[in-house]
Image (cartoon, rainbow, N blue to C red):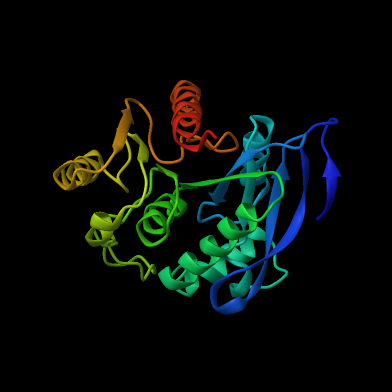
Amino acid sequence: MSGETIGGEATTGTVQVTGHQGDEIPAYLAHPPGPGPFAGVVVLHHMPGYDEATKEITRTFAANGYTAIMPNLHWRDAPGASPDDASAAARAAGGVPDERLVGDVDGAARYLRFLDSANGKVGVIGYCSGGRQAFLAACRLRLDAAVDCYGAFVMDAPPDGLPLKVVPVVGLAGNLSCPLLGLFGAEDTRPSPTETARLEQELARLGKTFEFHTYPGAGHGFFATDRPSYRSEAAADGWRRIWVWFGRHLAT
């Protein structure tokens, strides 16, 4: 890894992971200080892309004792482009194909598991489009915990007029491989509280381990400190629940 040590603590930098169909894709890695063992977390960025805000989230996991990695899910759409340009290219292409996403998350998880400092457990967390992708990955791969932060189109298809080609993935819920935490905003429309309530009912019917929390006064993107959608109280409670969830399911 070529990178730097932040404040004498977490070591960060760019690595290459072997993703879907053997493609080598860049990923941002943040490693806590010390030998470990550490659990791993795959961080899935939002539709705006492989940006500084999501890198900061990745560093936050390292600061709290998790080795975290964020694969660049848009890299193939515009190699070497800025996050904004790569995001635009990904949108124009209809979004990240599901099979490609699963292969890239699998590669990132394998990278974490093979580190000398690994404790063998890996979770996944995603925001916005990454929330849906975290759900998808947890249904298609063997993972130890998952967090869906306001992921849309798990239950329902995108409305007409959106360029996204994604499809609902609730049909895979029977294969959910790990406990799932869902964090949502009551003012969100994608997903709406009605949609997340229906997903909650389906997971309960299937006997899955999950917890959903919906925050009054919060809409889509309430974790995003660099956006007007940020809601400090909801984000603070969301982070608290994330630490409890991963601490419970990813501990050695």
Using the image as rendered, state which of residue 214 and residue 173 is in the foreground. 173
Using the image as rendered, state which of residue 164 and residue 204 is in the foreground. 204
Q: Residue furthest bottom?
A: 21
- Image coordinates of residue 77 in percent, x first then y, are 59, 73
Compared with 14, 215 (above or below) is above
- Image coordinates of residue 41 in percent, x first then y, are 56, 45
Q: Residue at x 73, y 69 (%)?
A: 80
- Image coordinates of residue 58 in percent, x first then y, are 64, 42
Please state, as top left, top right, bottom left or bottom right, where the C terminus lies in the image: top right
Q: Is residue 141 left or right of residue 116?
A: left
Q: Residue at x 45, y 35 (%)?
A: 249
Q: Residue at x 46, y 53 (%)?
A: 130
Please state, as top left, top right, bottom left or bottom right, where the N terminus lies in the image: bottom right
- Image coordinates of residue 173 in percent, x first then y, are 26, 55
Compared with 133, 54 (above or below) is above
Q: How many marks?
A: 0
Q: Quadrant of residue 119?
A: top right
Q: Quadrant of residue 159?
A: bottom left
Q: Quadrant of residue 82?
A: bottom right
